[in-house]
Structure formats: structure tokens, C-alpha cells
Amino acid sequence: MMILILIPLAVLLLFLLKYKHSYWTRRNIAQDEPSVCFGNLKEYLVGDITMNQAIQKSYHALKKKGVKHGGIYFLYQPVWIPIDLDLVKRIFTVDFEHFNSHGTLFFSHEKDFVTMNLFNLSGPKWKTLRAKFTPTFTSGKMKLMYDVVSVIGDRLEQYVDEFARNGKPIEAKDTALRFGSDLITTCFFGVDSDSINKPESSVFREFGQRIGTLRPLKMLLENIFNWDLLANLGYRFSDKDITDFFTELARNTVEYREKNNFTRGDYLDILIQLRKKGALNDDETLNDGEGGFLTLKEMVASMFLVFAAGLDTSSSATVHLLFELAKNQEIQDKLRNEIKSLADKRPDGKLTYDDLMEMKYADMCISEILRMSPSLPEVPRECTKSYKVPGEDVIIEKGTRVMISAFAIQNDPEIYPDPEKFDPERFSPENKKLRHEYSFFGFGGGPRSCIGSRFAIMQIKLALSKYLTNYKYTLNPKTPEKLTLKKHTISLTPREDVLLDVTPLNY
């Protein structure tokens, strides 16, 4: 009798699951065929590939069907995958009003106020906050804080010099993480963490690694349960000790500076001025329609976002770039020559912010490494207003999750021949003109592009100038010729230690 009951129930369940996985075909949209239990994430969840590699496989499977877009499933949640670059451009820019949210990628709720930041917010709240922060990331503001930043750069060079003089290999992953941690904490929190010289005592370095690690079970909870319920039960995006630490640190630092009228020439000074005056100077006033003064909670949420998002991404890009430079000596020499030619023009040999911005070959190298290993492999969007796909009788429903795969597009051999080859010349002015403008989006695209891109570029260029001016890098025998990726990290983080041999150059 039990068997007679269970068999029909099993058949009914299978039918329901199959029906869920027919969402795209019922809408006359091509789909990459899912597995019954895992959707299109089976190899990620039970195998040994990253999520972006799983999405890349679906991208190519859909592209072989000759379609401009298609659908996949995260378990049973339908996800739309744009493939055609003109369509990608429309989503980012022309039709932005239909896709103006990142969607429910990460948990966010007012009760966990550090999550109410630019990345997670949408609609009028996002627009207001974006208007407040946009003036704080101009080239002029980056230039003002460069003296604070350059001190951390000098510390990095001293650290590298010790390894070079002692004939010891440097571990690029750990070094880049220490440098990034010090740079962000000094600029955004007003704290000298000195992770470069004292890694064992730096909570910032530890917290940075924990924030950048994805936990599948946690993500599953966030996708199954209502966020209001989770928030009322005390659920948080980050572990409580991390959130409480950064909240308390930010509040104390801001309150101390305001009370004592203390300035340091860093990014935090800029935020405090915006909080107190609603303006950065006489010609950059924000009117009421743009949001006006910053609240303390908005400041803390922004500071937490910069640390959480900026540390892992910029550090990862630096590691991959150093790895490729060690493999490609001619490119390394050319980049070093550009850095030295600018430094030689300065009486003290120290590069200024303007010098960093003149490093055009460095720009090409950074773009190429962000092509190969984008900081955000998938650019998320949500369909916030039902969308008719141009030229097709197809509607993308409001609330549909969208994934634009930077990793798949930027490593597509039909767009970039021999995509695994590191070739900065792809981004020469002449070669860039030969490709679609949205064949590369290292910092996203459209109104929701990365607001901190200037800071990230400054950080990477400063690191390059300190790494390369007086030192040559080659792969240590223990470092493989091809890196594999960690499975559960937000950015494309190598699994292996990236050991590089450092040779001092005697000029």
C-alpha cells in the first residue's frame, strides 16, 4: 500500500520539478538543459568548478544554438543570460529603466544597515545615494588623498626589497591582500593597520578573507526564506563580529574627527565634509533633490562596502597581473620602462598621482587582466519592469534575475582570439576600435558602473610602480604555469600560492 502511494507522489513531484524547469521553453526562449535537482549549477554544487565557470558553460551551450539570449536555472530559479553584445549594451544603458537593480544577489535589510549600500539598493533610494557619493570619487578627490596612499606604497616597496635582498620568493596573493587592506583601511577608516609588516595582528586582513568567501548553505537560506523573516530572527549578511567591528570602528572614528576637528587628507575627510555640509566645496553643492547631507549610517554602510568589495577585487586583479608579468618578461620590461621614464622626470624619483594617470601601457595591462579575470565575473541585474526583447515577440517578466557574464564574454574566442593569452595590445586605441564597445566591461557599465573604479585603478597602478621599478619577477618552480580558481570566493582567487622569485635591479 505504501509503495502504491509513494509511486504516484514521486511521479507528481517529478512532473512539478520538470514543469519548473520548463519556464524558459514555455516562453519560447532557448534554455541550457538543467539537471532535475540542481538546475544548471550541478557541476558547481557537487563538482569542482566555480560558479562563473558553470555559467560560462551555459553561455557557450546557448550560443551554439544561435540565439542572442537564453535561460538557465539556479536550482529552480530562472535566470536570463544575454549573449548578444547589442543586447548587453541596451540592458546597461538604453533600457536601463527596465534593469536598474542588482537584484537579490546578497542579503540586505534595514535591520542590518551596513547592507543598505550602493550595491544592494535600487530605485529612488539607490539614485539618491549614488548622487551623494558620485562627487567623492572624482580624479580631484583621488589626487587629494594621494599623499596618504603613497605612504602605504613606500611600505610595500620596503617589504618587497627584503625578499629581493634575501633571495626569498614572495607570495603574491598574501602580499597583495596585505597592501590592499592597508590602503583601504587608512583611506576609508583612518586606521593604520600595517598588515604588510604585522599580518598576524591585523584583523582587517582576516576579516577581508572571510567576507570574500562564499558559503553555499548561507546563500541557499537567503534564496529560500523571506528576508524580513531572516532579519527579524537576527540574520546578518556578514558574521556578527565582523559587522559589529566595522560599525563601531567607523562610528568612533567619525565622531572623534568631528568632535576634535581633526583632518588627515584621506577619503574619510571627504565623507565627513559631505555629512556636515552636504557639499564638498562651493561648486559641488548637492541640492535637496539629490539627497543632501549624508547620515552616519550611510557613511558606515559605504565604508563597509568599500572594504568588502574593494579589497578582494583589487587584490585579486593585482595577483593575476603579477603572475602574467612574471610569465611574460617582454611585457614586464615594457611596463617597467614606462614607470621608470615617468619617475626619472621627478627630482626625487617619486611618482605623483598625475604620473600614475599618464601610465597608458599600465592601463592596457590592467584592462587585459580584467578581461581575463574580471573582478566581478558576473554582472547581476534584475528586470524591474517587464521588458520586450527588441526584434522578438518575447517578454522578460518583471522580477526575473539577469546575469551578464563578463567572464564568458571576455574570454569568448570569437571576440578575443586565443583568450588565455595575456596580450595588453588588445587594448591599444587602434585595437579597441575594432571591437564592440561592450565586449569589455571591467567595471560594469551604464549608470550602475563601479563608482570606485578610479580608486581601484590608482591602487593597482601604485602597487605596480612599487613592485616593478627596481625589481624583476619570474615564476618560482613551485608555481604552476596555469592557475586554478578557488570554488567559493566572490572574485577569481587562485587556489595555489603564487610564489614569485624577486631579483633586484641595479640601475
Image (cartoon, rainbow, N blue to C red):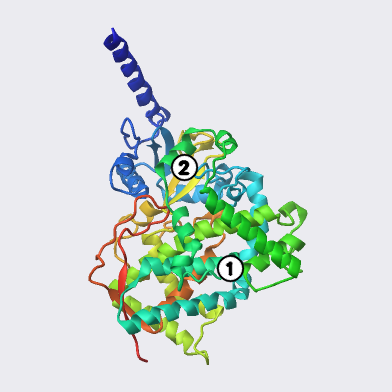
Q: Nearer the viewer, residue 243 or 28?
A: 243
Residue 329: mark: none
When asked about the image quadrant of residue 274, the answer is bottom right
Q: Nearer the viewer, residue 272 or 208?
A: 208
- Would you name the residue on which mark 1 appears? 191
**Whether residue 327 is situated above or below residue 29 in the rendered picture:** below
Q: Nearer the viewer, mark 2 or mark 1?
A: 1
Name which residue type carries label 2.
Answer: Val
The spot of residue 322 in percent (x, y) is: 36, 71
- Would you name the residue on which mark 2 appears? 402
Name which residue type carries label 1.
Answer: Val
Q: Nearer the viewer, residue 492 or 66?
A: 492
Q: Nearer the viewer, residue 421 or 307?
A: 307
Q: Residues within 10 Å of mark 2 (few under 14, many from 20)?
A: many
Q: Residue furthest top?
A: 1
Q: Secondary structure at mark 1?
A: loop
The spot of residue 100 in percent (x, y) is: 57, 46
Instruction: Tell me if 135 is positioned left or right of 327 in this view.
Output: right
